[in-house]
Image (spheres, rainbow, N blue to C red):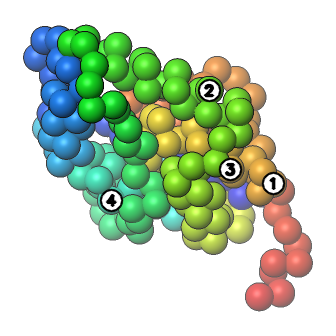
Amino acid sequence: MARLLLVRHGRSAHSHDGSWIGATGARRFEELYDAAPIRDDETPPASLIQAARSADVLLASDLPRAISSARAIAPEREPVVSPLLRELGFNLPRWGPKLPLDVWDGLHYLLWTARLLARTNTPETERATSAAEWVASHAARRGTTIVITHGGFRRLLTAKLTTQGWSLVRGRRRYHNWSAWELHRPHDPAAIAD
């Protein structure tokens, strides 16, 4: 059986000061956040480090926080990196009141929840389809593949992977940094002939 662990990266080295910001400030925060690696004091859970030791494949988004997260869990390995696994853009309006960053993030989450429920086709959902195909093409036929990605994009990627025959392991899906969602796909005996 093939196993995927879709992991949200560690905490970013770029943090917000808690001030209220408008849409322009939220976009600027996103730019700085995307340019930053994880914090120097960030330590992945021991269970994730152990899983990485025995993983057959290590994949990561090309954003610095995902690459540095992959190196934190498996310092002896270089991940296979792709922009397909990048986080969803905020896609914020040009206008808007000043709000806490968490509110902007919450609005973004609600927007994507509505799009997922409505099965809206967007450039981001098309990228998620391509990402799911790319992940599946790199996944170990039998064994574990770890994918370091981002909280929002992981939702889209999971939805697309389940349409390709992957099954999400039941249980509570957490969203915090270093959280892992596990998917399985039964082994295809016909693939051994390759």
Could you say where residue 139 lies in the image, as x and y percent from the top left? 62, 65
Lower sequence index among marks 3 and 2: 2
Residue type for callout 4? Asp
Tag shown at residue 165: 1
Tag shown at residue 62: 4
Quadrant the C terminus occupies = bottom right
Could you say where residue 110 lies in the image, as x and y percent from the top left? 52, 21
Q: Nearer the viewer, mark 3 or mark 2?
A: 2
Lower sequence index among marks 1 and 2: 2
Question: At x 18% / y 30%, what residue is drawn?
Answer: 24
Lower sequence index among marks 1 and 4: 4
Residue under pointer 3:
160
Question: At x 15% / y 40%, what residue is drawn?
Answer: 32
Q: Is residue 169 above or below residue 101?
A: below
Could you say where residue 152 lies in the image, as x and y percent from the top left? 47, 36
52 lies left or right of 29: right
Residue type for callout 3? Lys
Question: Tag 2's secondary structure?
Answer: helix
